[in-house]
Amino acid sequence: MPERFEAIVVGGGPAGNAAALTLARSGAAVLQIERGEYAGAKNVQGAILYADALEAMIPEFRDEAPLERHIVEQRMWMLDERSHVGTHYRSEDFNEERPNRYTILRAQFDKWFSATVREAGALVICETTVTDLLRDGKGRVIGVRTDRDGGEIYADVVILADGVNSLVAQRAGLREEIKPDHVALAVKETHFLPPEAIDQRFNIKDEEGVVIEAAGAVTEGMLGTGFIYTNKESLSVGIGCLVSDFADTGITPYGLLERFKQHPSIRPLLAGGEVKEYAAHLIPEGGYKAMPRLFGDGWLIVGDAGQMVNSLHREGSNMAMSSGRMAAETVVELRQDNRPMTSRNLRLYREKLQDSYVMKDLKKYRDLPTVLHRNKQFVTTYPSLLSRAAQTFIRVDGEDKRTKEKAIAKSFLKGRSLRGLVGDAVKIARAVR
Amino acid sequence: MTTKEVTLTVKVEDKLFQNRYLVDEGRPHIRIKDPSTVSPTLERLVTLCPAGCWSKQADGTLTGSLDGCFECGTCRIVAKAVGDELEWSYPRGGYGISYKFG
């Protein structure tokens, strides 16, 4: 192994793999360090893969990557204890030649992505934990320290793709600890079922897939959502809420997941499945305002480590890939011009992010995390009210329709008051405009 | 089924059983700095930890058994928010949880 690399990438998730791939293809001597047994061993996601960000780097990925099902139907459910009301959007248009979204199993997907990085010429070492950054007398980052013997490795630039905890940057004093209300804890299980059972239960065929996102009573007053995603021969079933809410309520994450699975709308979908894994991971939910500084002398931060998640649209791995690619492109451009990896020059990375959907979307929803955090009624009271309203409206019981409408209006006024209803409408409109 | 009934039947150990871990024997990667003075916030780890790693003993002390740890970081974030009661690092390279599906 050479003593010195042109770039070191810390982490083998989507952000790190995108960065290492882009660097390797440019001919740079790049070392990627992953602490897991293999790339993906430590990684958890729902998981939905958005094709666009990956396609920008690997146009032929559909022929090579381990994909589960392409998504043809999206269900958004709002639940009370015994019911759900919601919207489904399904379209034959999603059965296209180059589908837009797929379900994936991250451990398998990341392994494939990592193999692609190796083929492109990067040196990828696993089972090695980066413990700290090496700095020179002026504080510039000049390499990394690992937990291996003689584990000091030098590089012109270090790209930190070490995930939501961003421990390396924290240790080096480049960023602060994450706040409990800026991060969600999600738990999930992988339930195996025969593909035919999945097809029948979700009204799909071949490799079509369905996404269910669920909000309401299932989070027991906490800010969060549950989900079911269809894989080829398994279902990903999970639920996540803010860490601060779990801490305040004393609700156990696994208890919450178990009750979600018992909900009468969820339970029949899972019946007879065999659980083969239980996983937990943090999701950065603080958005734009919680982002740390993303670059400095000799270093760049990409993906979850930079809090790049659009929590409203459930996007994160795409932003990870795009930011990893843009960080690497920045390094490649500077190398070509023989310019040093100074903070001043690496600012180009931030400019690239700002010109892209990554920063534009994070900025657009910058107030949403705070608004939702302070107004949990959006995910607790309203789903229940809507669910009950639907039942009042549908049930034929001798009551005239005008009386039913009045009862629904009254339930909303009682649940939130007129001032509350108007205020909520304004708040949510401002937060997503 | 009521909430209470379900709560009573959930055993996190049963869930962890399916997972693959390579335990680094004798080298816990998370440590309570001073187990004799544990804040009420740190005691919340008993319910908060998704792997149920933390338990309160009969003598009132909090102990961590990290074999099922997901390395998620929840305990560190909560501990840091109120003080600095935990020493937290990732396991040595290759050790800890290895997800098959993720």
Image (cartoon, rainbow, N blue to C red):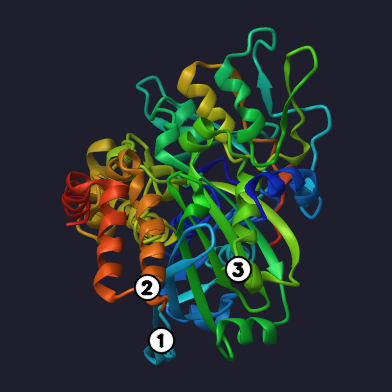
- Look at the image and tell me in which quarter the C terminus of chain A lies: bottom left
Letter of the chain that mark 3 sits on in the rendering: A
Q: Earlier in the sequence, mark 1 or mark 3?
A: 1
Separation of disc 2 and disc 1 at Cα? 14 Å
Give the residue at mark 1: A94
Task: Please indicate whether residue A70 sits to the left or right of residue A128 in the image.
Answer: left
Asked whether the residues under marks 2 and 1 belong to the same chain, the reply is yes
Give the residue at mark 3: A112
Decide if residue A337 is in sight here: no
- The residue drawn where x is 71% and y is 60% is B100
Closer to the camera: disc 1 or disc 3? 1
Rendering coords of residue A59 (x, y %): 42, 79
* Depth order, front residue of A6/B99: B99
Labels in figure, total: 3
- The residue drawn where x is 69% and y is 41% is B51
Rendering coords of residue A8 (x, y %): 49, 46
Separation of disc 1 and disc 3 at Cα? 25 Å
Q: Secondary structure at mark 3?
A: helix
Where A101 falls versus A255 (above or below)? below
Q: Are marks 1 and 3 in contact (CB under 8 Å)?
A: no
- The residue drawn where x is 39% and y is 87% is A91
Residue type highlighted by circle 2 = Asp
* Depth order, front residue of A9/B64: B64
Numbered circle sitting on residue A52: 2
Task: Please indicate whether residue A31 sits to the left or right of residue A306 in the image.
Answer: right
- The residue drawn where x is 58% and y is 14% is B39
* Local crowd size for mark 1, using a 10 Å CA cut-off: few (<14), some (14–19), many (≥20): some
Residue type highlighted by circle 1 = Phe
